[in-house]
Image: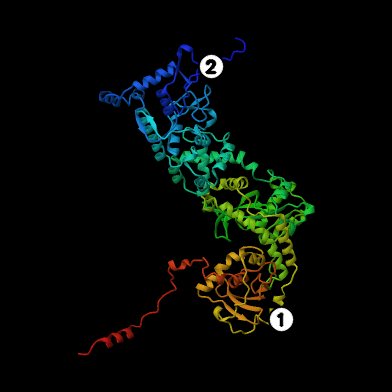
Amino acid sequence: MPGHKTEYFNCVLCSKRTKPKERRHIDKSIRKYLKKKFLLEGKENSVICSKCRNIYYREKSCHKPTETQQSVSSSSQTSDSRQLSSPPSVSLQLLSTAKTHAYCIVCKKPGPKLVVISPECRTAVFIQHNVLIPSGNRCCPAHVKDGLLTSAAIEQLPTTDHAFVNRTAILSLLQHMRVLCQRNEQTHLDFDDLQTLTDSDCLSLLGLSMDNFQTLCDCLKDHVKQTPSRSLRKSTAIFLCKLKSGLSNQILSTLFRTSKSSLRRAISAVRNAMMTCFVPYNLGFEHITREDVINDHTRHLAQTLFGDIDKSQAILVLDGTYIYTAKSNNFRYQRRSYSIHKGRSLIKPMVIVTTTGYFVSIQGPYLADHKNNDASILEHIMKTNAEDIKNWLSEDDIFIVDRGFRDALPLLEDLGIQAEMPRFLEKGQKQMSTSDANKSRLVTKIRWVVESSNARIKRWRYLDRTLPTNQIPFVGDYVRIVCALSNKFFPPLSKSHSIEEDEADAAKMLYLSKQVNNLQRLVEDNGLNRRPTQWQPVPECGIENFPTLDEEQLRNLTCGTYQLKLSRSYIQEHIDGDCDIWFHKDNDRLLRVKIQSRHTSSKQYLVCIEFSDCSVDAWYCTCRAGARVVGMCSHIAAIIWYLSKGRHEGGKYGVRDWGEHVLDAADIPPPVDESDSDASSCDSVPEE
């Protein structure tokens, strides 16, 4: 009839529209059954279809099986698990979800686009969250990821505080638990199931976090062939674990449950794949432009100290590193790979980084004889135009190098490249001038990053060990892969907090580099370094008025942290060792100190410090770099740290003397005089 509102009667359990003849109102017992088993609240006007009602009466009328039925069931359980089907007659005090396949157990959305929850998924939920999910339950596909329920779906699961299960469900759960235990016993390292590993485990074994490991596997998925015994993740994990730990193939084959031949094939396949699809996009002069290096990977401190912001100069730091190898049976190669400096066989990759520690390129590796020093390697790179480096560079670009590149400076000058290098001692000099020492400090302030970059390479222990000669053809690939991984996944080694902080530090260092050391003139003019002095140990010298400084004030004086890190070791040697620090106070503002060299036992240095009530005003040391005023040498830093901070900390410096656990052949007790011992023994004998 027009205007008449049609009323539909859907079954409260299966949600199907019921015909008038099949429609039944739910009573109190049915409402209790629905709430207990399906977590459904039946209203008074709710209806249930005949089919669902018959199921209810059928379950209600079921009784416990007899002993004969139980024996027959137990004898046939191995042949057909479906014969073990029984009514839910066991009540367990466990969290459980409703048993239904009509709607999603998470959001209660009705079908038909639902998926059955797999036994593996149900077992995982029970193990991790102690929640039972009955067999046959279904959920929306959005709640499942990689065959498991998502964490958001598990948090939304409606549960009861008890569960009704049958023998079939119990046996099925026990069987899945048994299979899982056997899998854990047989596989020590399973990278196919990342849920068995923590992020810290992945970092320790592979050097990458779980997310970064997955990203790397996604890059290699089309270039590494998977086999029935070795998946992509397993092959990649074997390769990274080999680089990170440096373990032998025998140990790795035990850990990964694979043969050594299969392991070697996995390492070779992943290495070739990474050199094809990963390294070219993360390392080399072709993967990055000059503009990106200048804008994203150059510290303003370096640009202010050596460059010109208006010219947009690229600043690169170069140094060679060492990969040690075994001796070769080829005598010619053995001679060419022997380093007189290190006293062992090695090959030398040339590392080129930015001032933030970003690897731009790795050249080589090269031989290690006198024809392959750092200068010769740089000349070879420029003359052969490796990786089209000449077109990448521009005039007035800057190379930060050490003294080993001195023979290559004319070539760089011809190419229009500015080279910055620590200064040399002139012939006959024992100490650098203040100007040379200051300029050398400006260079080392920037150049340290390449040393830390080399240390980052050696953190992959495979490259820190003596490699067999059959691995020499692949050393260059391994070093490039490690550097590409560092560029892709690791943070920069050197990064300032702000541009203003870098500019302030650079302005301060440039200003100090143009100053002279007035205290040095005072010492030399008055002969304080030669004047006989009555030296006194620390307790007898009046230094109570020396100013107290904190860490930030000390860093401002030293222009860095390296000297402060050595201070504790210097002071520990003199406080607990055989040496003493001798003080002499010439006046209320000038203090002279004798300190032992850490390299030469027969050498001591004279340190002069001028101070006031609240600050340290000037310093001078007789060591090679002790005349500089841009920061200070380690001897001066150790004395200032001890007097201003260390002596107030209770004498604990955190430096342990391991020599107490090692014998000293020079420590021989004096021989015992046998005649004296005989005489004493005779004297002790009583007379008859």
Per the image, the residue denoted by label 1 is 525
Q: Is residue 372 visible?
A: no
Residue type for callout 1: Asp
Q: Which percent across, then down, holds residue 651?
A: 52, 71
Q: Tell which tag, 1 or 2, sits nearer the viewer.
A: 2
Q: Which mark is residue 482?
A: none
Tell me: residue 576, above or below residue 677.
above
> In the rendering, at what x and y percent does residue 658 appear?
47, 66
Element type at mark 1: helix
Cα separation between marks 1 and 2: 111 Å
Amino acid type at circle 2 is Tyr
Q: Which of 106 and 82 lies nearest the eye of the viewer?
A: 106
Residue furthest to the right in view is: 310
Q: Position of residue 198 (x, y in %)?
A: 49, 44
Which quadrant would the N terminus be assigned to in this image? top right
The mark nearer the N terminus, 1 or 2, is 2
Judge whether residue 291 can be spotted in this image: yes
